[in-house]
Image: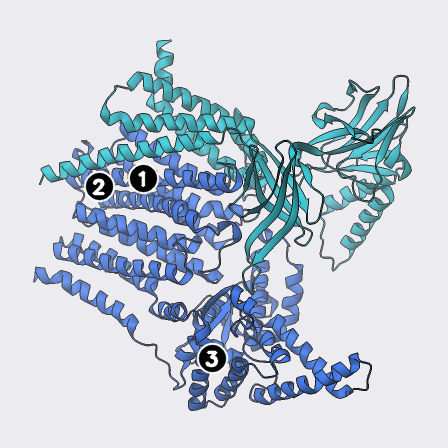
Amino acid sequence: MNQRIPFLIFLPGLLYVLSGFLPPRHQVDMDIDGFSRLPVQTGGRVMPVDTAARNQLRIISGRQHVRLEEGGRMPASQWLLELAFRPEVADDLKVFRIENPEVLGLFGWDPDIGKFFSFNELQPHFRAIREQAVRVNPEAQLRTPFEKQIVQLHHALSLYNELAHSFTSTGNLSQLEWEYLSWLQAVQTGRDAFRARELGEEYDIEAFNRFAFLTDRFMELSRRASLGVIPPFTAEQREENHWLDIGQGLLLTLRTDEINPVAAAYAQLSAAYRAQDAEYFNRTLATLHAEIDPQAPLGRVGFEHFFNHFAPFMKSIVLYLAVCLIIGYSWLRESEGARRGAYWLLLLALVIHTFGLLARMYIQGRPPVTNLYASAVFTGWGAVLLGAIIERLQKNGVGTLAAGLIGFVTLIIAHNLAATGDTLEMMRAVLDSNFWLATHVIVITLGYSGVFLAGAIAIVYVLRGIFTRGLSPELGRSLTRMVYGVTCFGLLFSFVGTMLGGVWADQSWGRFWGWDPKENGALIIVLWGALMLHARWGKLVGDRGFMLLAIGGNIVTAWSWFGTNMLGIGLHSYGFMDAAFFYLIAFWMSQLALITLGTLPKRYWRSPMQVAKAT
Amino acid sequence: MRSLFLFFSSLWLTIVLLALSILLVFFGTLDQVHWGIYEAQKRYFETLLAVWHYPPQWPLAQYLKGFWIPLPGGYLLGALLVINLLCAHFRYFRPHIRKTGIVLIHGGVVLLIISGFLTSWLQQESQMILSEGGPPVHYSIDYRAYELVLIDRSNPQHDSVTTIPLAMLYDGGELELPGLPLALRTHKVVENAGIGLRSNIIKHYEDLLAMARRPDSPVQFSAREMASVERILAAMRDSNALVVGTHGDVLLDKRGLQLRGFADRMDGVVHQRPPTFKEDEANMPAVVLEISGPEHSLGTWVLSTGLVGDIPPQFVTLGDQEWEIALRFKRRYHPFSLQLLKFSHDRYPGTDIPRNFSSLVVIDNPQTGEHRQTLIYMNHPLRYEGLTFYQASFADEDTTSILQVVRNPGWLAPYIAITLVGVGMTVQFMIHLIGYLGRRRTTP
């Protein structure tokens, strides 16, 4: 029986992962999945509609799907489909997230009625929103929660509006084909009128006016539309990979004397969707794919679609949590089988996590760490890898638990950081250096992994020692050795990473060190590591003191990783109201509490501590 | 003596110094929010003693306002760490192969700290501003230093420029100018000031007050701020006031002064402002200066770095000699010039996210006869004649390029230092790791 336990633990995990390969289910027979695969460009990057819809919906509502009032969920790409082609349906969907009671009060609403509202519910209050939005403090960091929410809502409304006008013109959505046809005629007759007018001859005023009116209208549309839906047209656009928005696409008629086939197909798609004609919809979709796909980096776009659907990091989160629970069980029941099962599950989670990392690298064509989100994913990955190695060396479950804990927490952090939009955004000019991204950033992030892993093992030491009898003298010694080794690793990587940053700065700006907050944060980690090791070598601390210092490493690293970013944004305020700041303080408090707990006199520890002192 | 050596070589001292360094860096970073990176660096890292005050913007400031923490500054900690390291080395070091890593690490750390001192003393930064289609520029500007200049343009071949650092001028100070028949007497120096026509300033404040009093005004003033603005207005309306303080007190009266130039002809006044510490703002000092010839006073001038644009230049005349006088940001002249051919600001398609900034410039060096084009862009600065020119900013709708110019003669030291430490750490940890794995293998 005992032999089978690891399999019994591993198998459900594997099945859970494999479930990601099942195709997405939709209630309608229209090929919504096919729509979500269409390539579009936003933020300078070509991506599947699915990603664009998820990113925008995440900014508007904080979620990647819409919760329907009648129960069930609507995926982001279907929501976008409604918004673009059936705005009368979309405008009743509750997607705008408003949590601030003062903002709700502005609209005369009670906080109890929920936190999601539809466009139509907000419409009577647009004036109030606009008025409040212009009055907010111009310095973002000094804004009150009310002002922040107003700005956020104002931004969400304009995003919503831009998205709604990104696929078609703004006329009658069922009869766009007629509108486009009359535009084609207007171009032909209007051009003659225009030429005649230039020459001072008699011209058709009505044709001229219609031409001018429609041209103006599409230029306005181009200012509003936020997605590049039409592949590059000229050689120069192809060179720059510049996709055209729908307004620019319709204006192409001025050059080609025909309606751009992609624009025309989107108009048909609109008519088909409005008529809920599945066959027509699917046929039009096939035309669209045939038009667009040859001009898009299809491998990447298709892969990104799979990546979104497979959601590797979400799967890893679940697996890491399971790992932690199973290790806890294995210690309670002293079950070696459960420990091994948890270890296998950890390896499975690591594989999925690694797959997610590599997938992001492939989609973006960049080294793994390019922004704060990616640093959270990578820090977790590094710590899990190290933890798995430690478990392999010392088969006692501690490495697995510490790895699972950090993997779980860092991916949750990443998940929350994603709410700001595209996590695969383009790199701003100064960061546009794959060499330094691949060296400095990777090394320093692995340094974070090391320090956090040491801290997590130390937490296991304190909690197990105080609350259980499980911390035997041998285990205590072995944990100390682990923390010592991991700290050495963390110090080496933090130091080398920090100094590589200095080299980057010197190469780019002619100065090695600029006392920038992020640099200072990294320096503090290095100083802390040096302090820990000197205290250890000088026998100024014993096993327990060393462990408590390692927990302190968590505080220091959290500061360097997140705290310094909170300072950097504005020069005048600390953004005390920011949720992230609250979590940072909460994390610090929890670590201080653990350190304080660890200083409890040894007679209160349930595990025998006297012997563990020996080194 | 022996106990002193024991103290300076002790590991406890190391721990204390490291802990204090952590605190110093932490509080220094916190204060960058208020002082900006440059000023915080001066107050925490390039000093012997630093003091952190509880910021009034923080919660509970009403109770903790007077709370402060003294800390040893960067110079003191750096010096003590080096002493501690050297003493400990002599006390504990026994030559052994297992210690090579430690020696390398500590050698590197000492060198790193020393290179920090070198950089702090020797590094100079300035900016070179180039406009597209503009003339070659052979100087860069240091926005944190100011100089008084007297320019004699009588020679058609070249101008003779006499510069006096603003730091040499102080209220009531007198200065003879060697080589020139002139002497200076400083009536007032203001570190940061607005300067303008009295009527304009009065109008500006009147408009501000009128707007603030409207019920739907977007600007809201507290009662104290209102009172302060009213005091400033009252002071400005006093036609004898020449320098008005931040709170509306008259710092210098024009009676008894023979005003010339801007202050005389255009009724120019100086309005003191609190110094700025923002990274993207410069202080605009102003000075009220009396200039005398060999026999008698020639008059009093108001000068400021803010006097640019449509304000005509000011002149001092003595007999048939004439000098243009001005207060300006310090210029560092180079024996070569750069000329901007083209500045480019590339964005990602369909977005405002910048992809690259680059400046195509011509280097012209009459000393070496060099005349060539080069491209300065992100992560690829120009290194020339011991200077690094990097693309720092741009202006005027992408037609002006601003290059940061850095001179750091000690640039090589950190490279050697970090190589030593990096190699040392790797060696030392490898020794540990191999030892640990070896022990694992022998004890089943």
Decide which of B22, A71 is in the foreground and name it.
Answer: B22
Instruction: Residue A596: tell me if it is visible.
Output: no
- Residue A204 is situated, as x and y percent measured from the top left of the image, at 77, 88
Left/right of residue A469 with respect to residue B90 in the rendered view: left
Amino acid bearing label 2: Leu
Structural distance between the alpha carbons of marks 2 and 1: 12 Å
Tell me if residue A528 comes above or below residue A371 in the rendering. Answer: above
* Residue labelled with disc 3: A291
Q: Colour of chain A?
A: blue
Amino acid bearing label 3: Glu
Residue depicted at 67% across the width and 78% down the height: A215
Q: Residue under mark 2: which chain is it in?
A: A
SS label for mark 1: helix
* Residue labelled with disc 1: A550
* Residue labelled with disc 2: A479
**Which mark sits nearer the N-terminus, 3 or 2?**
3
Q: Residue under mark 1: which chain is it in?
A: A
